[in-house]
Image: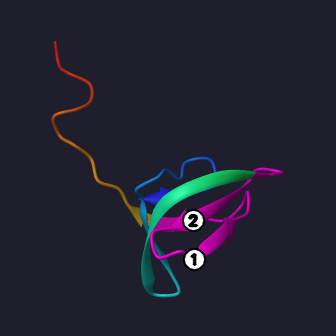
Amino acid sequence: MEIDATTVAVGDQVMIGGQGFTVHDMTAAGSGRKRLLFTTGETFTMQRTTVLWAARRVDPRVGSRRR
């Protein structure tokens, strides 16, 4: 899925430079930016206009239920 600074979430697995990283924590950095902290200790600042591809784990048991 495509993500940007407004839709990135903790636990997302993103690809940067052909290498996979898992988002461990994030903080707002002002002007719509977010600083991502990965489980490996590296950080990455996402600009407001940065678009990345990510894999997100979704629990099929959680979510909207049909009536």
Rendered view: 52 above or below 56: below
Residue 32 is one of the magenta-drawn residues: yes
Q: What secondary structure is marked by label 2?
A: strand
Horizontal arrangement in the rendering, residue 66 relative to residue 7 (left or right): left
Q: Which residue occupies 60% across, 63% down?
A: 36
Which corner quadrant of the image does residue 14 belong to? Answer: bottom left
Residue 67, percent from left and from top: 16, 12
Q: How crowded is mark 2: few (under 14 residues within 10 Å), some or many (20 or more)?
A: some
Give the camera-side residue of 4 and 28: 28
Amino acid carrying mark 2 in the image:
Leu
In the current view of this chain or complex, which residue is farthest to the top? Answer: 67
Mark 1–mark 2 CB contact (< 8 Å): yes
What residue is disc 2 on? 37
Q: Position of residue 63 (x, y in %)?
A: 26, 30
Give the residue at the far bottom of this rendering.
18
**Amino acid at dot 1:** Glu
Mark 1 closeness class: few <14, some 14–19, many ≥20 residues within 10 Å: few
Residue drawn where x is 48% and y is 62% of the image:
23
Q: In this view, does 42 lie to the left or right of 2?
A: right
Can residue 3 be seen here? Answer: no
Q: Foreground residue, 40 or 36?
A: 40
Give the residues in magenta: 29-53
* Residue for point 57% across, 65% down: 37
Question: Which residue is under mark 1?
Answer: 42
Give the side of residue 41 with respect to residue 22, left or right: right
Nearest to N terminus: mark 1 or mark 2: 2
Residue 57 visible? The answer is yes
Mark identifier at residue 54: none
Write down the quadrant of residue 25 in the picture: bottom right
